[in-house]
Amino acid sequence: MDFIVDVAELLKGADSVAVLTGAGISAESGVGTFRDASGIWNKLDPSKWATEEGFRSSPSMVWEWYQDRRKIIKDASPNKAHYSLVSLEKLGKKVTISTQNIDNLHQQAGSKNVLELHGNIFRNKCIECGKPYAKEIMNDELCKCEFCGGIIRPDVVWYGEQLPQDVWQMSEQAAIDSSIYLVIGTSGAVYPAAGLAILAKRAGSTVVIINTEPTELDDYADFVIREKAGIAMPEITARIR
Ligand code: BV8
Ligand code: ZN
C-alpha cells in the first residue's frame, strides 16, 4: 500500500479537503456497486431501471426495486472509510464530500458537508410537479402526489436528468478550491460527476485515487492507492493524528 505516507503528509498540511466518492466507498457496508464484477448494471439494464422513461413505462417494477434497495441500505452501516472522512473534520479540516451515492451513509457517519450529486434514496418526490413527498411509505404500492395526483418517484438523479444545480456548483467550487482531491470508490464512468476530478487536476489540485481496480480517471491522478477504501483510509488518517 505505497503512497499512504505521502498522502498522509499532504493531508496533514491541508486546511481543506475535497472528496468525490462512489459506490465503492459503501461496498464494505454491503451496499451494491454498479460496474465492477458484482455490479448492478451487469444484471439490470440502466435504461429500464434508472431513467424517467423506464420508470414511466413500468412504475411498479422500478418503484419496488427502489423499495428493495431502501431496505438493504436501511440495514447498512457506515464503514471505516466513511468514519475516516469524519475524523479529518474532527482534526479541524474543512471536508467537502461530493458523493454519487444515494445511501446517506456519509451523513450517518457524521460528515457535515455532504453534496449529494445523484440525490438520496430516502427522499421521494412527485414525478409531475416535483413536490417532495414526505409521507411514511407503508408498503410497496405506488403512491400519488397529494397536490396533483402524479406518481411518486425516488428523489434520485436518473440517466439523462440534470444534477441539482446548487449541489453541482458547490461541488465544482470545492474541486477548484481544493489543494488535495480524494477520489474514493468510483469507476469514473459517469458524467458530469467524474469531471470533478479532472476539474480539480486542471485547477492545480493533487488528485489521489483510492480504488481496488483501475478507473477511467487514473491518468489524472498524482497518487493511485490500489486498496480497499476501508483499509487505506484509516491507514492514512492514523498517520495524521
Ligand atoms: C446528465 C441513479 C444530461 C441513482 C445514477 C446518453 C444519453 C443521456 C445521457 C448520457 C448519454 N451518454 C452519456 C450520458 C451522460 C450520463 C453518463 O455519464 N452515462 C455514462 C454511464 C456513459 N450521465 C447522465 O445521464 C447524468 N445526467 O448527463 O444529464 C443533462 C444535462 C443538462 C440538462 C439535462 C440533462 C446523470 C448521471 C446520474 C445517473 N444516475 N444512478 C441510483 O439508483 O443509484 S448513476 C450510477 O453510477 C450510480 O448512481 C452511481 O452514482 C454512478 C457512478 O457509479 P460509481 O459510484 O462510480 O460506481 P461503480 O460501480 O461504477 O464503481 C465502483 C468503483 O468502486 C469501482 O471502480 C470499484 O473498483 C470500486 N470499489 C469496489 N469496492 C471498493 C472499491 N473501491 C475502494 N474500496 C472498495 N472496497
Ligand atoms: Zn405533484
Image (cartoon, grey):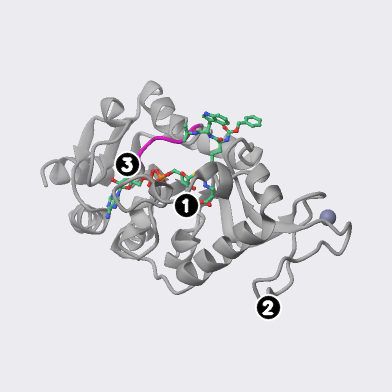
Residue 175 placement: quadrant: top left
Whole-percent x and y of residue 103? Answer: 49, 60
Would you place residue 17 above or below residue 201 in this image? below
| Rendered residue at 63%/46% (across/down) | 54
N-terminal label among 1 and 2: 1
Residue type pointed to by label 2 = Met
Foreground label between 3 and 2: 2
Whether tag 3 and tag 2 are in contact, CB under 8 A, the answer is no
Q: Quadrant of ligand 2?
A: bottom right
N-terminal label among 3 and 1: 3
Whole-percent x and y of residue 182? Answer: 33, 41
**Quick one: 240 or 128, which is closer to the camera?**
128
Within 10 Å of the Cα at label 2, are there few (<14), some (14-19), or many (20+) other Cα atoms? few
User: Residue 138 bears which disc, if any?
Assistant: 2
Residue at the spot of label 3:
14
Within 10 Å of the Cα at label 1, are there few (<14), some (14-19), or many (20+) other Cα atoms? many
Q: Is residue 119 magenta?
A: no
Q: Quadrant of the C terminus?
A: bottom left
Could you tell me what secondary structure mostly forms the magenta stretch?
loop
Does mark 1 have its CB less than 8 Å from ligand 1? Answer: yes
- Secondary structure found at label 3: loop
Magenta-colored span: 187-191
Foreground label between 1 and 2: 2
Q: CA distance from mark 3 to mark 1?
A: 25 Å
Residue at the spot of label 1:
101
- Secondary structure found at label 2: loop
